[in-house]
Image (tube, rainbow, N blue to C red):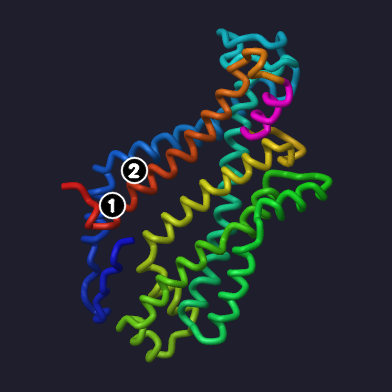
Amino acid sequence: MSTVPEPATDTVTEPAPQPTRETLHYALRNPKLLIGFTVVLLLLVVGIIGPPLLDNADPNEYVGPQAAPPDGTYWMGTTTFGQDVYAQFVHGLRATFLVGVVGGAIAAVIAMLVGFLAGYRGGVVDEILNMVTNVVLVLPALAVLLIINAYLGVRSVAVQGLFIGLTSWPWAARAIRAQTFSLRTREFVDLARLSGCSTWRIVFREIAPNMSSYLFMMFILLFGGSILIASSLDFIGLGPTEGVSLGLMLQSAQQWSALQLGMWWWFVPPGAGITAIVGALYVANVGLDEVFNPKLREA
C-alpha cells in the first residue's frame, strides 16, 4: 500500500488541494481504472434501468416459445420453459449488485469498527478483538452460510447479503488494525489526544482520512467477494427463494441440462455477467493501487 503522507500540524495554514488534484490527474490517465469502472458502471446502469423498461414485470413468467435461440424478439433467447433470458439477466444484475453492496458494506463497517478500535486502543481491547477476529476467521464461512441458508424458510437478497457481510470481515479488520497501529503514534494523533479529543473522534477525524484510499480499495474487494460468495450459494440451490439472480440463472441452466442441449444463451450471459463484474472490480482495484501508490505510477 502507499505510504501515508505526514499531514501538517499547523491547522491554520491554507488547505492543500494538490494531493486531490494529483490523484485525479493520474486516475483519469490510468487505463485499468477507467476500463474497470466503465464496465461496472455500464452493467449497473443496465441493472437499474433495464427492469422498468421490460414489458413483463416477472422475469420468471412464461412469455415465449420454449428453448428459442436469440432473435429480434427475445434478445437472449428463452429457457426450456419459455422464460425470457434477457429479462432474467437484467433482474439478475440488479440482485447481484444489491447483494454485493449489502454484503460489502456490512463487512466494511464491522471491519473498520473492530480494526480501528483494536489498532488504536491496543492492550486488552486489542487482545479481545483480535481473539474474536481470529475465531471468525478460522470458521468455515461457506459451511456456516450453507447451514444458515438451509434452515431459512424464506431467503431474500438482503438477508443473503447480511449473512455474507457478517462472515467476511475478519481479514479486512486485521489489515485495518495493522494500518492503525502505524498511524496512532504520528504527531497529529498525539496532538489530537493532548487536546482532549475522544477515541472515536481521533479515529474518524484524524486516522481514517489518512487511510481513505486503503479503505476504498478494501471495500471494492469486499464487494467483489460478496458477489462471488452469493453466486456460489445460488449455484448450489441456496440462493434467494424469490426473484432471480445471475447465480440462480446458472443453477437453473445446469439443473435443466442447458449445456447438454446446446442452449448456450441460457448459461453464457449470467456467467459472463458475474465474470465481468468481479473481473472489472479487481482490475479497477489494481488501477487504484497504481494511482494511490506513487511507486507504481507509470510515467
* Residue 251 within the segment the image draws in magenta: yes
Where residue 238 sits: x, y (%)? Answer: 73, 41
Picture quadrant of residue 13:
bottom left
Name the image quarter holding the N terminus.
Answer: bottom left
Where residue 296 sits: x, y (%)? Answer: 24, 53
Q: Looking at the image, which residue is at 43% across and 72% down?
A: 178
- The residue at which mark 1 appears reads as 291
Res. 33 mark: 2
The answer to whether residue 179 is left or right of residue 31 is right
| Amino acid carrying mark 2 in the image | Leu
| Amino acid carrying mark 1 in the image | Val
Where residue 242 sits: x, y (%)? Answer: 75, 37
Q: Main secondary structure of the magenta part?
A: helix
Residue range (magenta): 246-256
Q: Given contact means CB atoms under 8 Å apart, are the residues at marks 1 and 2 in contact? A: yes
The answer to whether residue 244 is left or right of residue 49 is right
Which comes before the other along the chain, label 1 or label 2? Answer: 2
